[in-house]
Image (spheres, rainbow, N blue to C red):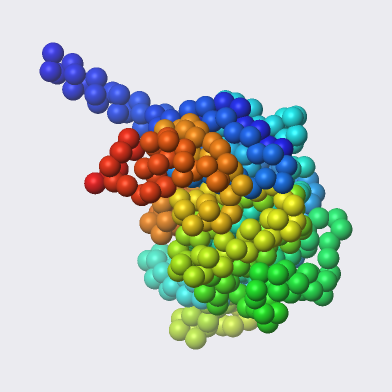
Amino acid sequence: MIELCGITKAFGKNQVLQGVDLLVSKGESLVVIGGSGTGKSVLLKCILGIVTADSGDILLNGTPMDRDAFLQDFGMLFQGGALFDSLPVWHNIAFRQRQGKVRLTKLQAIELAVEKLRRVGLKPETAFLHPAELSGGMQKRVGLARAIASDPSVIFFDEPTTGLDPIMAGVINELIREIVVEMGATSITITHDMSSVRAIADTVAMLHDGKVRWQGKAADIDTSSDPYLDQFINGRADGPIEGVR
Amino acid sequence: MQVILIINGFLASIGRSVLALLASIGRLVVFMADSISHIFRPPFYPVEFLQQLLRIGYFSLPVVGLTTLFTGGALALQIYAGGARFNAESVVPSIVAIGMVRELGPVLAGLMVAGRVGASIAAEIGTMRVTEQIDALTTLSTNPIKYLVVPRILAATLAMPVLVLIGDIIGVMGGYLVGVYRLDFNSAAYISNSVDFLERGDVTSGLIKAAVFGFIVAVMGCYNGFRSERGAQGVGQATTNAVVSASILILASNYLLTELLFPA
């Protein structure tokens, strides 16, 4: 269980997070939605310790999070894939397993990579290509394979369908849902793609003005009666959320 | 009243610039201290270190070799022309050797490596920063300083003295070629004059300088790469900053090291 209590973060005079409270239960898939610049990515980076929150608590199973221990059992799919250009696909996927005291041999690492590539629908020969030789959709799948390589109990997905065509976006959404259910992992996804929300989410939280504006079950988003959520999920220009024209 | 406001504004802008400069120096010192402390703490990445040794050391050899070869030749011509004004043409071999080993070898190699390696380190790490590869390293339980910075700093610091030593030999050889085939020096006399006047301290001081310059190049490349922002423009800026700051620091530290190693 991951619990965020009163997280605040400012960059100069720009107060991005203004007291975010959020709860993700074990095995739950939470999707955080919100417009661009509402602090969704900053929120994820605060949990990971990449950005230090100005105030507030981040708890894991009720105790303050030990980040090193947390990251040992964690996987993440980045918006742009964030694959290491200089390494072949197999090394990208088995990167964690090739570090540390007990590391896989090259052969074992390739076997692991091929197994994870199969899981995300890619052929074994992809393992020997470099990220620059892959299409955007393939890069996302390899990123997904890397995220699940250590069978983590917590996975974060940062804009998993950004830059993909609708069919590939649908494939990635389905893969994420299948993998999360199959592994029983706790997941947090940030997106503003409503098809992802409907495919992936058990629960949804909407960020607006640096706070959680609405949180509830995915099935309830169409009947929430919250004007902010309603405007966002229906993509209307008119409403309480100001658009930049 | 208007004058006071203008003076206030002027002083405030000076204050802001000084504070920004101090903040930058502070960040650089913290980054350097952090990097140095990680050199001695496991885990270590020997494969990455060897890769960097090859990239920074071996692949910089042609550019350093050519630079010192032509500089050695030009130096011989200049000293010959200058020495001819007071009948001291015979000092060409010794001055070329001392000048190359003490000063020109390390400084020119440092500047060339700053251009070649410093820029490449800043561009590579900067690209990794803006494409979230550095964040990805963190999420894969890998410390980016240990994995990216330490191997580069160690490799540059250790490779530069070797590069400079080879550059020194090539530079003296450049002087020898010009001296013997253009200025009609006797070959054996040229070599003997070069070696006889050279002291061990001349060579070691050049190598100490080289190690310091290598450290500067790698630290400035990594630091600017890590602080890169705003896409392609940010990476370009980081690359420029890395080369300019490393070059200035090399020239400044060269003066300080010369004062220290050869007090007047």
Counting from the top left corner in percent of width and height, residue A215 is at 54, 36
Name the image quarter holding the N terminus of chain B.
top left
* Left or right: residue B89 compared with residue A142: left
Figure check: A96 above or below B178: above
Counting from the top left corner in percent of width and height, residue A54 is at 55, 28
Task: Say which of A121 and B122 sits in front.
Answer: A121
Whether residue B260 is visible, yes or no, is no
Q: Quadrant of residue A23?
A: top right
In the displayed image of the protein, which residue is found farthest to the bottom? B181
* Left or right: residue A126 compared with residue B243: right
* Left or right: residue A114 compared with residue B79: right
Task: Say which of A175 and A92 sits in front.
Answer: A175
In the displayed image of the protein, which residue is found farthest to the right? A102
Name the image quarter holding the C terminus of chain B.
top right
What count of labels does the image hold?
0
Whether residue A75 is visible, yes or no, is yes
In the displayed image of the protein, which residue is found farthest to the front? A223
Residue under the image location 21 percent in, 21 percent down: B7
Residue under the image location 72 percent in, 38 percent down: A1
Counting from the top left corner in percent of width and height, residue A74 is at 71, 50
Residue under the image location 52 percent in, 27 percent down: A19
In the displayed image of the protein, which residue is found farthest to the top? B1
Residue under the image location 74 percent in, 59 percent down: A182
Counting from the top left corner in percent of width and height, residue A227 is at 38, 36
Figure check: B29 above or below B67: above
* Left or right: residue B22 compared with residue B30: left
